[in-house]
Every structure is written in structure tokens, then in C-alpha cells.
Image (tube, coloured by chain):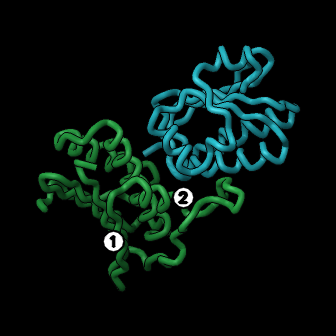
Chain colours: A cyan, B green
Amino acid sequence: MSNNIEVSVRTINDIPVIAIKGDVTAVTGAEVKTAYETISREGAMKIGCHFDPACYINSGGLAFFIEIASESRKNKQTVCICGLSDHFLKIFKMVGLTRCFDIIDDPEEAMKGGCG
Amino acid sequence: MKKVTEFELPTVLGSEKIAMEEVSKIAKSMGFNKDRIEDLKTVIAEACINAMEHGNKFDQNAIVGVVLAANDNSLTILVRDQGNGIDPKKIPESVFTEDGFPKVDCGMGMFLITNLANDFFYEQKPGIGNEVTISFYLDQ
């Protein structure tokens, strides 16, 4: 059985946004982390993360976001999250990730305002 | 408590989705609301992943057994593996650092199970494996 994920990066108002579709797991989450690291190396201080509402995220996937939270804190970057379903927003809150990321509703609007 | 279904999963990441679909169907027919069905799906997925990873140590010859049982007001999930067991002391009390930020690599699956379910019970069965029993109540 496969774990499928589609990760792409687009730019809105000069802010790179990682678009995530599919399953974020211990296996596939590495793709999100790689996208974050690539953007970081290019010097981005504001980064968006746009989830498809049908995304499935398990503890293995959450671990990658905890790593991103830790690195972005060290790098003094702002990471905005949008598109999470109500359930995964609750999970992000439960594990403390909403303290690390800005949670926004609409990526287009938020990026116009500078992400957060 | 009446057994509703029983099935086995291979020790292959991703197969937990079969359990998620099963629990979702049963919970819906019992009248659980959408939020609790999402909680049930997360909990059964994490219990199966733990069984594969910490119990069966990803041994593809080992299986994960799942039993779903119900009565009028509760749904119980039982997940069994065939491993030597995990140290219950390693189940985290908190997934936060002292300053309130999430810890990296700290037993997040077990944290989610214990925080989303109404009841949780873990048992090591020497020579057989581990068994976790998780209950959700309809009125909570």
C-alpha cells in the first residue's frame, strides 16, 4: 500500500508557499521538510504552508512539522499554515504547533498582507 | 460488548488506512458525530502504526490484529501486535518542552491516543505481544 503526497512550491507576493496534497506520514513528510529546507537556503524569512483540506497527517508527519517549527524558530522565520481541516487544526493545537506557526484562513489574502 | 468486526493488517505503513475506513463506517452507523469519527480514525491509525513500529518492529512476517466491539453507547478498539512490548515508562506524559513548545521525537502517537480517546488501556502479554484497548463513548 502506498503513501501518496504531492508537494509543490508557488510564490504569492514574493512569499514561497509549500502546497501539500495527500498523506503526510513518516515516509512522505520528508518531501515537505526538503521543500522547507530548499526555501530556507534561498533566504526566505516568511514561508507559507497550504494544506489541501483532504490531507491525512499522522504522528510521523507531525514529527516533520515539529522539526520545521524548531528550525524556523532558530532561523527567526515566520511560517504560516492554512487549509488544515478542523480535525487537524485541533491536532496541531493539541501538540503545540499552533504556538509555533501562524494559522491563517486564505493563503492569497494572507500572503498579500505579508503572511501573518 | 458485542464484537462487530475483526481483521488483520500486514505490518506495512499505509495499511492502517483499512482500519480507519472500518472504524469510520461503524462509528457513523452508531451515530458518532463527524468530529469524533475523525478522532477515532486518528486514534486507530496511531494504534496500528505503533503496533507495526514499536511492537512488530516492522517485521513483515508479523501481523497487526484489530477488533472493533460496541454496545449501545460505546465503541471499543483493540489492537494487538506480536512484538516483545514497549516500556510503559516510555509513554510520554507531555510532548512539550519546559517553555511550551513541542518536543521532537517523543511518542506523539501515544500522546494523541491518550488525549483523544475516552479510555485507554495497555497490556503486555509475554510471549504473545502487546494489546491496546481504546474506548470512545457516544455521549462524550
The correct choice, above or below, for A112 with respect to B35 in the image is above
| Residue at left offset 19%, top offset 40% | B31
Task: Estimate the x, y position of residue B56 in percent, counting from the top left.
Answer: 44, 69
Mark 1 neighbour density, 10 Å: few (under 14) some (14–19) many (20 or more): many
Query: In x, y percent, where is residue A1?
Result: 42, 46
**Alpha carbon distance from label 2 to label 1:** 18 Å
Assign a secondary structure to mark 1: strand
> Which chain's residue wears label 1?
B
Q: Is residue B113 above or below residue A54?
A: below
Return the residue at label 1: B131
> What residue did someone put label 2 on?
B108
* Residue A42, x across and y down, in percent: 87, 31
Name the image quarter holding the N terminus of chain B.
Answer: bottom left
Q: Secondary structure at mark 2?
A: helix
Residue B95 place in picture, x, y as percent: 59, 60
Say whether marks 2 and 1 touch (CB < 8 Å): no
Amino acid marked by disc 1 = Glu
Are the residues under marks 2 and 1 on the same chain? yes
